[in-house]
Image: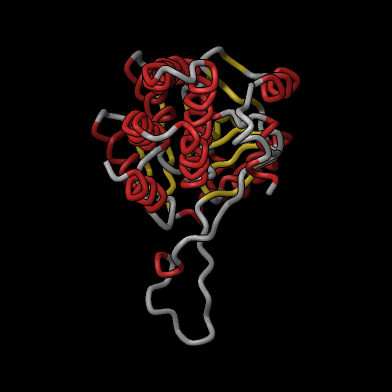
Amino acid sequence: MDLTAGIAEIAADSRSGATALAERAAALLTAAQSLPAEELPALCVALAKAQPAMAPLLRLANAVLLAAESHPASNAATRAAAKEFMSDLRRHAAQASRQGATVLPDGRVLTHSSSSLVAEAILGAHAVGRRIEVFCTESRPGFEGRALAARLAAAGVLVTLVVDAAAPALLSQCDLLLMGADTVCAAGLVHKVGTLGLAVAARYCGVPTYALATDEKLLPSACGEHPPVPERDPAEVLPDAPPGVTPLNFYYDLTPHSLLDGILTEDGPLPAETLDQRLDTISVHPALAGIWRE
């Protein structure tokens, strides 16, 4: 397997979610067992930087590096670490979705982007008779919200698809703002661009705001307060931009914890003080320590 090409493909992927990308990353790290031990840290750093806003890639790379450090003579240890990480991620995702279903009211919910955790939470609540109406944003520039809307509607959920700019004005008609998470860090929630504006509008309207996440989406404090948010291809926003016009395109923004009513994980609500302690106590391999402080 061409490891460099594999990392480049992950970096260029603007459609797949964190779990799908982590699956591919785990396959890459498994294939990297034949690498000399001194080359593994650089590979793991490159993997974490391929999608900096998606914490599971960094956490997977960290798990593999720690396993290699503890068992330097065993390739099987790194393979087992990658396998265990992915098994935990899938199990935690199912549990976090069930936690999300517990906060869903009979009423209107607005969601942004296309979180698999949010989708499963809504579908689970709908399956047990909860009467839920969902506002899905289109989620530009990738329009992934359209696919989420189609998936929910196919299951019988009442869905309204709205353009992103209209979503804040609709929050006054909603009972809940429920979103996924790409990274939960000391500085706040990293999620689809537009999340910050929705959280501000929800606070103004008095609408509860929750994010669903698994432990694998927590960014250790030792790595930095928050990951960088790189700019993306301007042509995704405006192909053939006229002279003098520079489209600005980035996929994520940072919402401070003060605008959230809670983070729900596989273990239930994660209080702010518990979150800080958890972020501080996650062990980090030296190769990844300070990666987002550079």
Q: Is residue 118 visible?
A: yes
On screen, residue 94 above or below 41: above
In the rendering, at what x and y percent does residue 7 appear? Answer: 38, 46
**Residue depicted at 38% across the width and 74% down the height:** 239
165 and 217: which one is in front? Answer: 217
On screen, residue 194 above or below 182: below
Q: Is residue 109 visible?
A: no
Q: Quadrant of residue 124?
A: top left
**Residue depicted at 61% across the width and 25% down the height:** 263
Q: Residue furthest bottom?
A: 243
Q: Is residue 248 left or right of residue 115?
A: right
In the rendering, at what x and y percent does residue 83 appear? Answer: 37, 19
Number of dots carrying numbers: 0
Q: Residue furthest left?
A: 154
Q: Is residue 284 left or right of residue 212?
A: right
**Residue depicted at 40% across the width and 15% down the height:** 91
147 and 203: which one is in front? Answer: 147
In the rendering, at what x and y percent does residue 171 appear? Answer: 56, 42
Q: How is the image coloured?
A: secondary structure
On screen, residue 183 above or below 280: below
In the rendering, at what x and y percent does residue 150 appear? Answer: 28, 40
Q: Is residue 199 left or right of residue 8?
A: right
In the rendered view of the protein, which quadrant contains the N terminus?
A: top left
**Residue depicted at 44% across the width and 65% down the height:** 233
